[in-house]
Image: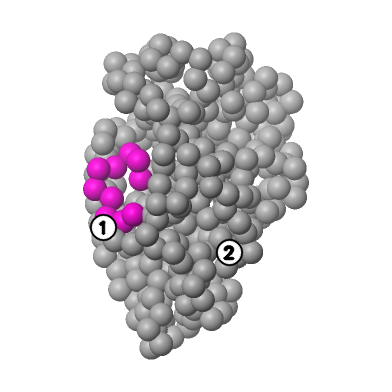
Amino acid sequence: MNLTLRRFDLALRHRWAIATDLNQGGGKSLYPVVFVELADAQGRQGLGEASPSSQYQETHATVVAFLGRVDTRQLSFEDIPASMAYLDTLAAGNFPAKCALNLALLDGAARAVGQPVHKFLGLGFREGVHPTSFTIGIDTPEMMSAKTREAIAMPVLKLKLGSPNDRENFSAVRGAAPGKPIRVDANAGWTAKEEALRNIEWLAADGHIQFVEQPMAVNMPEADWIWLKQRSPLPIFADESYQGAADAERCAQCFHGVNVKLVKTGGISAGKAALEAARARQLKTMLGCMIESSTLISASAHLAELTDHLDLDGNLLITNDPYTGVECTGGILGFQGATEPAGLRVRSR
């Protein structure tokens, strides 16, 4: 098996900031990712992507360092579980790098049998029924209003809060999109359960908020999360608090739903397991993303049938996507226009 990789800087349409970025000095205009390709002696090939996030102390450098340790003789399109088990022996964590390799392995395996990944995994994909939200990052109220007007065709918005200007920012977005459904993501920006409850009660009064994602930090006591869940007038979803299937039992006590991201779990295989574990505990499920190209967004879309909500807009936030795959038409994700019939259904532009 041969492994090649390349760094690529995704260029954002607008400067991007969330609550944790504000704590670290601001947002970003470029987002570095790493693309990997696997190829074996039989001519099978697969594509993957790592989108590391500073939220999890991951960078382009940590991805490259992990990939440099991989003995590709231990990877096989024919035995993906064993391949992933081998990667776990190299180091804990490093989920973006493991994600990239998992995508490439599944892409190659599914291509080899002429199937899209969702069918290869025993799932379906219904066209026309999977809407995604569109994210408005933290900015000045004027810019957030402008971003909202640009996204007028999107049926659902996701609004980043967790800054000192939450109320002004929310008013700006709401003024530009009266009555539109909004999902709120505080990215752990509220520091106490009482503050989180006050903010959720304020948001609930709007009447069009679907849920609130990660209102407090991961390290808040479990008792505080249970207290908030019991009192919240809106559903609360775990993001940073839900790393994978092992967190499902705790999150069932503390949240109404979870946000699964492939780069957070370590790929499609682990993402599927995380969604299934959450659903088994009657948690609502959402598939989310980082800033990503169509490679990772398409990979996530193959798991859409396991979700209640999608937030797969990372490729819509950039201007230089080097790949095409799943398409977003009027806010609805679909593969009808994809020219690649098998694997991730992704190809280079």
Residue 224 at least partly seen: no
Across and down, in percent, residue 156 comes to 49, 28
Looking at the image, is 345 positioned above or below residue 314?
Answer: below
Across and down, in percent, residue 332 comes to 48, 39
Residue neighbourhood size for the residue with mark 1, other residues' Cα within 10 Å, grouped as few (<14), some (14–19), many (≥20): few
Residue type marked 2: Lys
Q: Magenta stretch containing residue 213, yes or no?
A: no
Across and down, in percent, residue 35 comes to 32, 63
Residue 40 at least partly seen: yes
Q: Is residue 309 left or right of residue 16?
A: right
Across and down, in percent, residue 305 comes to 61, 50
Q: Secondary structure at mark 1?
A: loop
Boundaries of the magenta span = 315-324
Residue closest to the far bottom: 41
Q: Nearer the viewer, residue 63 or 195?
A: 63
Residue neighbourhood size for the residue with mark 2, other residues' Cα within 10 Å, grouped as few (<14), some (14–19), many (≥20): some
State the residue at coordinates (58%, 49%): 126
Q: CA distance from mark 2 to mark 1?
A: 24 Å
Residue identified by numbered label 1: 349
Q: Secondary structure at mark 2?
A: helix
Q: Nearer the viewer, residue 172 or 264?
A: 172
Image mark for residue 119: 2
Looking at the image, is 114 positioned above or below residue 163?
Answer: below
